[in-house]
């Protein structure tokens, strides 16, 4: 029997046999419900429109449900209209008003169709769970409508039909339709997994995080682009410089200045006063020149503080020969694309000039004062992690560092301990949280290492940022990557990694992003005989020409595990006006469980429920034996 103290605590929640009976009955019933739908996305990279649409249509889940429910009742155009209404209710209703289509009868029909769809989705949950998702203002009415079939021949038919008529007649239909559409999207997906890289390249990562925060049932496996922003918000100057450099390079300064209120005025004034203007397409802007030098100085200072990183070969400022116009890298002299280094002191190349120090002090104050950024980063810490093990799947963004022979690579930590596999990922997770909580300098440095370190599980390659900035010869840009990315295609290697995280059996999988899948060249996201699924979302438009698609998402539900390849999104306007959806280029069934649908009992939540049932059974036995006394009425 469990510890009596624990049973005594449980007895405070269930003080009688009747209360324990009720809970056991409820929990056993829940075990037989179909498992909730999980939606996996990755590498969003600030592409708000494409992400919002994938998020709204749940990678086709809503379209599938509409087809299943209305396939024989509504024609293809009406089904597409209904889907678009769910995805973009405000915009669709506005378009219908302007075209004269939004009549009272049409509003009534749309409400009935939406409620039928919501009802079929709600059938997969307990009534109490659905109640928690209902909007506060319409909760009672929606609860009534969800638990009766409109149009059915029942004593309550007139009552429920009058509710819908009243909604239309009093002018509440539009607001109600928007509320039901939002409820449908919440019911369609039980859990959203974001497998890294919300930030950078695209223009609106801030709005994406706003949507994730509003969604609620979401987790994030940190990507290297995320961790750079997290480090900057935590107080790492080298991460701040990296974030600014990325925004300057990808011309997304609005994210910093408008979205997060971080002014680059001091940097711009310093750059204009210090660096030369070099006209020409391939020449760097003065602001980029200025932030590059600041970044590389701070980077080399961090490397000097961490000999365990073994990154001295990335300290290249001292290898610049301005007179010769070259930089020596790995014993070879490479021609520089610019010799404009006015703040570089050859005798002390990593030292910031007085003006550079002033720029960084200003940036540090601006990052610290950005309440919105801190709120977003707090969300990533509270709802994110370096990796996640859930329902037989191991989720992480980049890699689990490996040796060339496929064994787990031991990485030396700041405390002098070598860690590998799960222990190493747990360590980097703790270091990131320590940086956020304590502002410890060594932990803050690790935030930058996680952005680009060769053994970072979030990056997994040696980044050639210096070479890309200053060396025109692209032969110098090649970035060695961790052996993981090639070796994990081997089922045996993938199986060992899964076992390291406690996952074994025929239906366990690694799910990660980070590396675009070049389907156009014959590459595939399904590797190691299906044990590894790479779902780099491909949201970033710049990748579409080289990958041939707009990336992948993953859906896991009671019917199995399905990988979806998507075509590029034509935009919200096209979606609303023409019912244009993100079409799946193709779908691949990874696990087919249609013959024996997965129930809650087969999930991690089910295991926790079964453990709770066992404890409640022990509590009942304690009551029956007199070991514990009931409080209140005795059955």
Image (cartoon, helix red, strand yellow):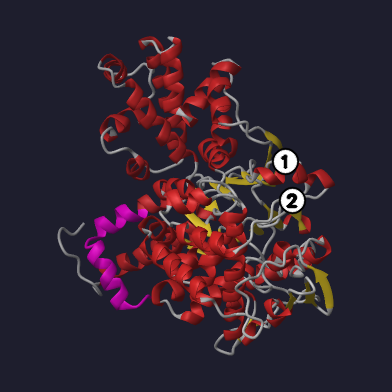
User: In the displayed image of the protein, which residue is found farthest to the left?
Assistant: 632
Image quadrant of residue 609? bottom left
Tell me how many marks there are: 2
Up the image or down, 290 lies above or below 191; here it is: below
Residue 108 vs residue 522: left or right?
A: left
Q: Position of residue 223 (x, y in %)?
A: 58, 61
- The residue that appears at 31% across and 74% down in the rendered structure is 6
Of 500 and 33, nearer the camera is 500
Q: Which mark is residue 517?
A: 2
Q: Which structural element holds mark 2?
A: loop
Q: Magenta residues, as a range?
A: 1-24
Measured as percent of width and height from the top left, residue 435 is found at 45, 74
Q: Position of residue 42 (x, y in %)?
A: 60, 52
Q: State the residue position of label 1.
A: 549
Q: Is residue 113 magenta?
A: no
Residue located 71% across and 52% down the image: 516
Picture quarter with the N terminus = bottom left
Judged left or right of residue 580, residue 256 is: left
Q: Residue at x 55, y 54 (%)?
A: 199
Q: Residue at x 37, y 67 (%)?
A: 615
Element under label 1? Answer: loop
Of labels 1 and 2, earlier in sequence is: 2
Prevailing SS of the magenta stretch: helix
């Amino acid at each position: 029997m469990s510890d009596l103290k624990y049973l005594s605590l449980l007895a405070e929640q269930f003080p009688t046999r009747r209360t324990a009976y009720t809970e056991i009955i409820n929990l056993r019933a829940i075990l037989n419900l179909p498992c909730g739908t999980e939606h996996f996305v990755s590498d969003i990279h600030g592409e708000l429109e494409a992400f919002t649409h994938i998020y709204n249509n749940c990678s086709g889940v809503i379209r599938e449900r509409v087809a299943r429910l209305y396939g024989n009742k509504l024609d293809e155009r009406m089904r597409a209209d209904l889907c678009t209404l769910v995805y973009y209710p405000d915009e669709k209703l506005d378009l219908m008003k302007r075209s004269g289509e939004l009549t009272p009868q049409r509003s009534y029909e749309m409400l009935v169709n939406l409620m039928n769809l919501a009802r079929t989705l709600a059938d997969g949950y307990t009534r109490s769970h659905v109640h928690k998702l209902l909007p506060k203002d319409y909760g009672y009415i929606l609860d009534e409508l969800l638990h009766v079939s409109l149009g059915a021949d029942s004593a309550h038919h007139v009552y429920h039909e009058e509710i819908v008529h009243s909604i239309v007649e009093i002018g509440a239909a539009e607001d109600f339709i928007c509320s039901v559409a939002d409820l449908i999207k919440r019911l369609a997906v039980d859990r959203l997994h974001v497998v890294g890289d919300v930030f950078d390249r695209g223009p609106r990562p801030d709005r994406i995080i706003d949507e994730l925060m509003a969604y609620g049932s979401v987790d994030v496996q940190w990507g290297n682009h995320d961790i750079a922003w997290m480090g900057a918000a935590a107080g790492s100057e080298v991460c701040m410089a990296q974030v600014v450099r990325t925004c300057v390079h990808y011309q997304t300064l609005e994210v910093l200045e408008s979205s997060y209120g971080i002014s680059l005025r001091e940097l711009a004034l310093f750059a204009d006063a210090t660096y030369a203007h070099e006209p020409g397409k391939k020449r760097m802007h003065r602001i980029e020149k200025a932030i590059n030098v600041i970044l590389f100085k701070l980077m080399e200072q961090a490397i000097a503080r961490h000999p365990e990183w073994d990154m001295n070969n990335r300290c290249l400022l001292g290898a610049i020969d301005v007179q010769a116009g070259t930089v020596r890298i790995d014993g070879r002299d490479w021609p520089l694309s610019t010799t404009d280094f006015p703040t570089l002191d050859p005798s002390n190349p990593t030292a910031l000039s007085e003006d550079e120090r002033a720029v960084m002090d200003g940036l540090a104050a601006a990052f610290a004062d950005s309440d919105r950024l801190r709120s977003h980063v707090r969300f990533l810490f509270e709802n994110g992690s370096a990796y996640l093990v859930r329902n037989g799947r191991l989720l992480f963004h980049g890699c689990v560092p490996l040796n060339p022979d496929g064994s787990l690579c031991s990485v030396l930590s700041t405390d002098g301990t070598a860690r590998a596999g799960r222990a190493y990922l747990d360590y980097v997770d703790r270091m990131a949280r320590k940086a956020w909580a304590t502002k410890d300098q060594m932990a803050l440095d690790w935030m930058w290492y996680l952005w680009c370190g060769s053994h970072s599980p979030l990056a997994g390659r040696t980044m050639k940022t210096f070479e890309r900035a200053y060396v025109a010869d692209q032969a110098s840009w090649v970035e060695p990557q961790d052996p993981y990315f090639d070796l994990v295609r081997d089922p045996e290697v993938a199986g060992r990694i899964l076992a390291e995280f406690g996952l074994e059996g025929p239906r366990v999988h690694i799910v990660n992003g980070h590396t675009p899948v070049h389907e156009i060249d014959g590459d595939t996201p399904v590797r190691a005989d299906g044990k590894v699924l790479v779902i780099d979302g491909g949201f970033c438009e710049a990748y579409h020409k080289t990958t041939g698609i707009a990336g992948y998402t993953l859906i896991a539900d009671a019917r199995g595990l399905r990988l979806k390849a998507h075509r590029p999104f034509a935009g919200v306007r096209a979606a609303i006006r023409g019912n244009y959806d993100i079409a799946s280029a193709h779908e691949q069934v990874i696990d087919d469980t249609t013959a024996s649908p997965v129930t809650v009992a087969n999930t991690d939540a089910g295991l926790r429920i079964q453990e709770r049932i066992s404890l409640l059974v022990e509590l009942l036995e304690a009551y029956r034996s007199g070991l514990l006394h009931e409080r209140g009425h005795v059955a």
